[in-house]
Image (cartoon, helix red, strand yellow):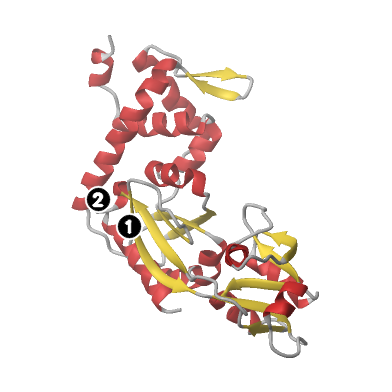
Amino acid sequence: MYIMHLRNLDLNLLTVLDAVVEARNVTRAAQRLHLSQSAVSHALTRLRRAFGDPLLVRGSDGMAPTPLALRLAGPVRDALATLQTAVGTLRTFDPATTTDTFRVGATDYGELLLLPGLAEAVRRAAPQVRILTQPIRQETLGEDLATGRIDVAVGFVRHPPADTHAVKLLDERYACLARRDWRGALTLRRYLDARHLQVSPSGTLSGPADEALARLGTRRNVVFATPHFTSGAGIVARTDLLMTTPARVARTFAREMPLRVLAPPFEIPPIALTMMWSARTHRDAGQRWLREALGAAARGL
Protein backbone atom coordinates (compact mmCIF):
# COMPACT_ATOMS: atom_id res chain seq x y z
CA MET A 1 0.00 0.00 0.00
CA TYR A 2 2.83 2.41 0.86
CA ILE A 3 5.56 1.21 -1.53
CA MET A 4 5.03 3.87 -4.19
CA HIS A 5 5.15 6.65 -1.60
CA LEU A 6 8.32 5.32 0.08
CA ARG A 7 10.24 5.27 -3.18
CA ASN A 8 10.31 9.06 -3.09
CA LEU A 9 10.42 9.51 0.66
CA ASP A 10 13.12 11.92 1.83
CA LEU A 11 15.28 10.22 4.47
CA ASN A 12 15.25 13.42 6.52
CA LEU A 13 11.53 12.91 7.01
CA LEU A 14 12.25 9.73 8.96
CA THR A 15 14.29 11.69 11.50
CA VAL A 16 11.31 14.01 11.91
CA LEU A 17 8.97 11.03 12.30
CA ASP A 18 11.21 9.56 14.98
CA ALA A 19 11.46 12.86 16.87
CA VAL A 20 7.75 13.71 16.68
CA VAL A 21 6.58 10.26 17.77
CA GLU A 22 9.07 10.25 20.64
CA ALA A 23 8.33 13.83 21.78
CA ARG A 24 4.59 13.74 20.91
CA ASN A 25 4.89 17.47 20.47
CA VAL A 26 5.93 19.43 17.37
CA THR A 27 7.64 22.18 19.33
CA ARG A 28 9.77 19.80 21.41
CA ALA A 29 10.63 17.77 18.31
CA ALA A 30 11.75 20.95 16.54
CA GLN A 31 13.97 21.88 19.48
CA ARG A 32 15.57 18.43 19.48
CA LEU A 33 16.22 18.59 15.72
CA HIS A 34 17.35 22.24 15.79
CA LEU A 35 14.66 23.10 13.25
CA SER A 36 11.88 25.67 13.23
CA GLN A 37 8.43 24.59 14.31
CA SER A 38 7.07 25.39 10.84
CA ALA A 39 9.71 23.18 9.21
CA VAL A 40 8.71 20.24 11.40
CA SER A 41 5.01 20.89 10.77
CA HIS A 42 5.66 20.92 7.02
CA ALA A 43 7.64 17.67 7.27
CA LEU A 44 4.81 16.07 9.27
CA THR A 45 2.36 17.06 6.53
CA ARG A 46 4.58 15.36 3.94
CA LEU A 47 4.82 12.25 6.10
CA ARG A 48 1.06 12.09 6.48
CA ARG A 49 0.66 12.36 2.72
CA ALA A 50 3.30 9.68 2.10
CA PHE A 51 1.83 7.16 4.52
CA GLY A 52 -1.83 8.03 4.00
CA ASP A 53 -2.25 8.29 7.78
CA PRO A 54 -2.46 11.20 10.24
CA LEU A 55 0.39 9.61 12.29
CA LEU A 56 -0.31 11.91 15.25
CA VAL A 57 -3.69 13.19 16.38
CA ARG A 58 -4.68 15.58 19.08
CA GLY A 59 -5.81 14.07 22.36
CA SER A 60 -6.52 15.20 25.89
CA ASP A 61 -2.81 14.91 26.79
CA GLY A 62 -1.37 16.43 23.61
CA MET A 63 -0.46 14.62 20.41
CA ALA A 64 -1.04 10.85 20.37
CA PRO A 65 0.58 8.51 17.79
CA THR A 66 -1.75 6.46 15.64
CA PRO A 67 -1.37 2.65 15.54
CA LEU A 68 0.58 2.95 12.27
CA ALA A 69 2.95 5.51 13.79
CA LEU A 70 3.60 3.19 16.72
CA ARG A 71 4.30 0.28 14.38
CA LEU A 72 6.73 2.42 12.40
CA ALA A 73 8.50 3.91 15.43
CA GLY A 74 10.70 0.95 16.37
CA PRO A 75 11.89 0.00 12.86
CA VAL A 76 12.51 3.64 11.96
CA ARG A 77 14.55 4.22 15.12
CA ASP A 78 16.57 1.05 14.53
CA ALA A 79 17.21 2.02 10.91
CA LEU A 80 18.34 5.52 11.85
CA ALA A 81 20.66 4.13 14.51
CA THR A 82 22.19 1.73 11.98
CA LEU A 83 22.71 4.53 9.48
CA GLN A 84 24.19 6.78 12.16
CA THR A 85 26.68 4.08 13.11
CA ALA A 86 27.61 3.46 9.47
CA VAL A 87 28.09 7.14 8.70
CA GLY A 88 30.00 7.67 11.93
CA THR A 89 32.59 5.09 10.90
CA LEU A 90 33.18 6.89 7.60
CA ARG A 91 33.29 10.53 8.53
CA THR A 92 36.39 12.33 9.65
CA PHE A 93 36.30 14.51 12.73
CA ASP A 94 38.38 17.63 13.14
CA PRO A 95 37.81 19.19 16.59
CA ALA A 96 39.22 22.50 15.44
CA THR A 97 36.56 23.02 12.77
CA THR A 98 33.56 20.90 13.76
CA THR A 99 30.29 22.53 14.76
CA ASP A 100 28.82 19.38 16.32
CA THR A 101 26.45 19.56 19.28
CA PHE A 102 27.00 16.94 21.99
CA ARG A 103 24.43 16.03 24.63
CA VAL A 104 25.99 15.02 27.95
CA GLY A 105 23.93 13.53 30.74
CA ALA A 106 25.49 13.89 34.17
CA THR A 107 24.74 13.51 37.83
CA ASP A 108 25.45 16.44 40.11
CA TYR A 109 28.93 15.02 40.79
CA GLY A 110 29.72 14.83 37.08
CA GLU A 111 28.54 18.38 36.48
CA LEU A 112 30.54 19.73 39.39
CA LEU A 113 33.84 17.96 38.82
CA LEU A 114 34.00 16.82 35.18
CA LEU A 115 32.29 19.56 33.19
CA PRO A 116 34.91 22.24 33.97
CA GLY A 117 37.59 19.97 32.47
CA LEU A 118 35.38 19.21 29.48
CA ALA A 119 34.70 22.91 28.97
CA GLU A 120 38.44 23.60 29.00
CA ALA A 121 39.03 20.87 26.40
CA VAL A 122 36.32 22.35 24.18
CA ARG A 123 37.72 25.87 24.54
CA ARG A 124 41.23 24.70 23.71
CA ALA A 125 40.63 22.14 20.97
CA ALA A 126 37.06 22.45 19.66
CA PRO A 127 35.95 26.09 19.97
CA GLN A 128 32.86 25.71 17.76
CA VAL A 129 31.46 22.65 19.53
CA ARG A 130 28.32 23.08 21.62
CA ILE A 131 27.70 21.07 24.78
CA LEU A 132 24.18 20.56 26.12
CA THR A 133 24.05 19.02 29.59
CA GLN A 134 21.09 17.55 31.43
CA PRO A 135 20.50 15.43 34.53
CA ILE A 136 20.33 11.67 34.08
CA ARG A 137 17.53 9.47 35.38
CA GLN A 138 18.24 5.82 36.02
CA GLU A 139 14.77 4.72 34.95
CA THR A 140 15.04 6.29 31.46
CA LEU A 141 18.81 6.25 30.94
CA GLY A 142 18.88 3.31 28.51
CA GLU A 143 16.17 4.84 26.34
CA ASP A 144 17.76 8.30 26.50
CA LEU A 145 21.06 6.91 25.21
CA ALA A 146 19.43 4.72 22.56
CA THR A 147 17.28 7.52 21.16
CA GLY A 148 19.90 10.27 21.19
CA ARG A 149 18.40 12.43 23.90
CA ILE A 150 21.80 11.87 25.54
CA ASP A 151 25.01 10.99 23.67
CA VAL A 152 27.05 10.02 26.71
CA ALA A 153 26.23 9.81 30.42
CA VAL A 154 28.47 10.03 33.47
CA GLY A 155 27.39 9.23 36.99
CA PHE A 156 27.38 6.90 39.96
CA VAL A 157 25.19 4.26 38.33
CA ARG A 158 25.42 0.87 39.97
CA HIS A 159 23.73 -1.01 37.14
CA PRO A 160 24.31 0.50 33.67
CA PRO A 161 21.42 -0.15 31.29
CA ALA A 162 21.53 -3.21 29.09
CA ASP A 163 22.85 -2.76 25.54
CA THR A 164 25.12 0.13 26.52
CA HIS A 165 28.87 0.43 26.66
CA ALA A 166 30.24 1.37 30.09
CA VAL A 167 33.70 2.15 31.45
CA LYS A 168 34.77 3.12 34.95
CA LEU A 169 36.34 6.57 35.11
CA LEU A 170 37.39 6.55 38.76
CA ASP A 171 36.67 5.23 42.23
CA GLU A 172 35.43 7.68 44.82
CA ARG A 173 35.50 7.40 48.60
CA TYR A 174 33.35 9.31 51.07
CA ALA A 175 34.08 12.13 53.46
CA CYS A 176 32.04 14.27 55.83
CA LEU A 177 31.56 18.01 55.68
CA ALA A 178 30.93 20.09 58.80
CA ARG A 179 30.94 23.77 59.60
CA ARG A 180 34.50 25.06 59.98
CA ASP A 181 34.13 25.64 63.74
CA TRP A 182 33.69 21.89 64.35
CA ARG A 183 36.06 20.86 67.11
CA GLY A 184 37.61 17.46 67.79
CA ALA A 185 37.44 14.12 66.01
CA LEU A 186 34.31 12.76 64.42
CA THR A 187 33.56 9.62 66.42
CA LEU A 188 30.76 7.22 65.66
CA ARG A 189 28.90 8.45 68.73
CA ARG A 190 29.12 12.08 67.61
CA TYR A 191 28.13 11.08 64.08
CA LEU A 192 25.00 9.29 65.32
CA ASP A 193 24.11 12.13 67.69
CA ALA A 194 24.38 14.73 64.91
CA ARG A 195 21.68 15.88 62.52
CA HIS A 196 22.44 15.13 58.87
CA LEU A 197 21.82 16.50 55.40
CA GLN A 198 21.48 14.03 52.50
CA VAL A 199 22.13 14.99 48.87
CA SER A 200 19.42 13.06 47.06
CA PRO A 201 18.30 13.74 43.48
CA SER A 202 15.34 11.43 44.07
CA GLY A 203 14.25 13.25 47.23
CA THR A 204 14.82 10.39 49.67
CA LEU A 205 16.33 10.78 53.14
CA SER A 206 18.83 7.95 52.80
CA GLY A 207 21.98 7.08 50.89
CA PRO A 208 25.11 4.89 50.97
CA ALA A 209 25.97 6.00 54.51
CA ASP A 210 22.63 4.70 55.74
CA GLU A 211 23.18 1.36 54.02
CA ALA A 212 26.57 1.06 55.74
CA LEU A 213 25.08 1.99 59.11
CA ALA A 214 22.27 -0.53 58.66
CA ARG A 215 24.89 -3.26 58.31
CA LEU A 216 26.21 -2.11 61.70
CA GLY A 217 22.72 -2.32 63.15
CA THR A 218 22.30 1.41 63.70
CA ARG A 219 21.00 4.53 61.96
CA ARG A 220 21.57 8.29 61.78
CA ASN A 221 19.18 11.23 61.97
CA VAL A 222 18.70 12.70 58.47
CA VAL A 223 16.59 15.86 58.71
CA PHE A 224 17.25 17.62 55.41
CA ALA A 225 17.50 16.48 51.78
CA THR A 226 18.49 18.49 48.71
CA PRO A 227 19.17 17.35 45.13
CA HIS A 228 22.42 19.28 44.70
CA PHE A 229 25.84 19.27 46.36
CA THR A 230 26.18 23.05 45.99
CA SER A 231 23.05 23.84 47.99
CA GLY A 232 23.94 21.11 50.49
CA ALA A 233 27.38 22.58 51.15
CA GLY A 234 25.90 26.06 51.55
CA ILE A 235 23.42 24.76 54.10
CA VAL A 236 26.10 22.90 56.08
CA ALA A 237 28.27 26.03 56.18
CA ARG A 238 25.48 27.88 58.02
CA THR A 239 24.08 25.15 60.27
CA ASP A 240 25.12 22.33 62.58
CA LEU A 241 24.25 19.67 59.97
CA LEU A 242 26.73 17.08 58.72
CA MET A 243 26.87 16.05 55.07
CA THR A 244 28.38 12.72 54.01
CA THR A 245 29.51 13.18 50.43
CA PRO A 246 32.06 12.04 47.84
CA ALA A 247 35.52 13.06 49.04
CA ARG A 248 36.44 15.11 45.97
CA VAL A 249 33.23 17.10 46.38
CA ALA A 250 34.00 17.69 50.05
CA ARG A 251 37.50 18.97 49.29
CA THR A 252 36.22 21.21 46.50
CA PHE A 253 33.72 22.98 48.73
CA ALA A 254 36.09 23.16 51.71
CA ARG A 255 38.43 25.28 49.58
CA GLU A 256 35.65 27.74 48.82
CA MET A 257 33.42 27.80 51.91
CA PRO A 258 33.88 27.84 55.71
CA LEU A 259 33.75 24.05 55.91
CA ARG A 260 35.85 21.30 57.42
CA VAL A 261 36.47 17.86 55.89
CA LEU A 262 36.26 14.95 58.32
CA ALA A 263 36.83 11.23 57.89
CA PRO A 264 33.71 9.09 58.38
CA PRO A 265 33.97 7.06 61.62
CA PHE A 266 32.86 3.86 59.85
CA GLU A 267 33.53 2.18 56.52
CA ILE A 268 31.43 3.27 53.54
CA PRO A 269 32.23 1.26 50.40
CA PRO A 270 33.65 3.41 47.58
CA ILE A 271 31.57 4.08 44.50
CA ALA A 272 32.57 4.01 40.84
CA LEU A 273 32.00 6.94 38.48
CA THR A 274 30.92 5.34 35.20
CA MET A 275 30.72 6.67 31.65
CA MET A 276 28.03 5.10 29.46
CA TRP A 277 27.09 5.36 25.79
CA SER A 278 25.00 3.53 23.21
CA ALA A 279 26.07 1.29 20.35
CA ARG A 280 24.50 4.03 18.23
CA THR A 281 27.48 6.31 18.89
CA HIS A 282 30.19 3.76 19.65
CA ARG A 283 32.15 4.13 16.41
CA ASP A 284 31.42 7.78 15.68
CA ALA A 285 34.68 9.77 15.55
CA GLY A 286 33.22 12.85 17.20
CA GLN A 287 31.66 10.83 19.98
CA ARG A 288 34.99 9.10 20.58
CA TRP A 289 36.60 12.52 20.95
CA LEU A 290 33.91 13.51 23.47
CA ARG A 291 34.44 10.36 25.52
CA GLU A 292 38.22 10.83 25.48
CA ALA A 293 37.77 14.43 26.68
CA LEU A 294 35.57 13.29 29.57
CA GLY A 295 38.06 10.55 30.42
CA ALA A 296 40.89 13.09 30.49
CA ALA A 297 38.80 15.36 32.76
CA ALA A 298 38.35 12.44 35.16
CA ARG A 299 42.06 11.63 35.13
CA GLY A 300 42.78 15.27 35.87
CA LEU A 301 40.94 15.00 39.18
Q: Position of residue 223 (x, y in %)?
A: 77, 62
Tell which residue pokes out farthest to the left in this image. Answer: 90
**Which quadrant of the figure contains the N terminus?**
top left
Circle 2: element type = helix
Q: Position of residue 294 (x, y in %)?
A: 40, 67
Front residue of this view, candidates 276 and 272: 272
Q: State the residue position of label 1.
A: 287
| 274, above or below 238, in the image | above
Return the mark for residue 54: none
Tell which residue pokes out farthest to the right in this image. Answer: 239
Counting residues from the start of the chain, the first of labels 1 and 2 encountered is 2
Question: Within the image, what quadrant is residue 55 found in?
Answer: top left
| 140, above or below 10, in the image | below
Front residue of this view, candidates 1 and 221: 221
- Left or right: 25 with respect to 3? right
Q: Amino acid at mark 2?
A: Gly
Tell me, yes or no, if residue 45 can be seen here.
yes
Tell me, yes or no, if residue 36 can be seen here.
no
Q: State the residue position of label 2.
A: 88
Tell which residue pokes out farthest to the bottom in this image. Answer: 184
**Is there a contact, CB below 8 Å, between mark 1 and mark 2?**
yes
Q: Position of residue 273 (x, y in %)?
A: 44, 66
Circle 1: element type = helix
**Residue appearing at x 76%, y 89% in the figure:** 183
Q: For label 2, count other residues whose C-alpha is less than 10 Å away and answer few (under 14), some (14-19) or many (20+).
A: some
| 106, above or below 251, in the image | above
Q: Position of residue 14 (x, y in %)?
A: 34, 30
**Residue appearing at x 61%, y 82% in the figure:** 263
**Residue appearing at x 25%, y 50% in the figure:** 88
Tell which residue pokes out farthest to the top in this image. Answer: 1
- Left or right: 66 with respect to 216? left
Q: Amino acid at mark 1?
A: Gln
